[in-house]
Image (cartoon, grey):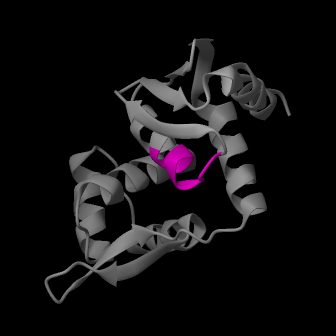
Amino acid sequence: MKNRRQLKILNIIKNRDVATQEELGLLLEEEGVNVTQATISRDIKRLGLIKVPDGDGEYKYAIRSNNSKGQVQGWLQKMFQDFVIDLDYSDNIIVLKTVQGTAGGLASAIDNSRWDDVLGTVAGDNTIFLVVKPKDKAEEVLDKFKKLLSD
């Protein structure tokens, strides 16, 4: 439940300008997640979210880009184990099948982890396409993802 909620938070932050914990709580409620302000505060800290200028003189939440590699790796591993159902590849595209409603947040986490050889992601509700560059690295990246599932 916690990881799913945190993925929803990442997805909201990625797609909307959110200025306050109260606003984030309301957006989570729209997603069917009832949560206290204290829980939102803990999630913000756990996710390493920061406030950045929004360009209009206000501030919004954003994903910190300097999380430690070990911190990001451990968090990704937990999310992979909780949410990835299947994975495969063709040429330079890796396809991750996820639990319903978790693909957007997981794709955002992958993008923000600056994973070597992953050019970017596109997510639906339960599917993520990852583009690998160069093409000959796709199998190697897939093996790293499989390792996240098995460790």
Image quarter hosting the C terminus: top right
Residue 1 in sight in this render: no
The residue located at (38%, 81%) in the rendering is 51
- The answer to if 30 sits in the magenta stretch is no
Query: Residue 111 location in percent, x, y?
Result: 50, 47
The residue located at (70%, 26%) in the rendering is 137
| Residue that protrudes farthest toward the right in the picture | 151
- The answer to if 111 sits in the magenta stretch is yes
Identify whether 68 is placed above or below 135.
below
97 displayed left or right of 137? left
Query: Residue 150 location in percent, x, y?
Result: 82, 27
Tell how many labels: 0
Quadrant of the rendered image containing residue 40 = bottom left
Query: Residue 128 location in percent, x, y?
Result: 46, 27
Query: Residue 122 location in percent, x, y?
Result: 39, 32
52 displayed left or right of 109? left
Residue 111 in sight in this render: yes
Q: Nearer the viewer, residue 84 or 94?
A: 94
Q: Nearer the viewer, residue 126 or 29?
A: 126
Quadrant of the rendered image containing residue 86 = top right
Q: Nearer the viewer, residue 127 or 139?
A: 139
The residue located at (59%, 67%) in the rendering is 46
Identify whether 102 is placed above or below 23.
above
**Secondary structure mostly seen in the magenta stretch:** helix
- Magenta region, residue range: 108-115
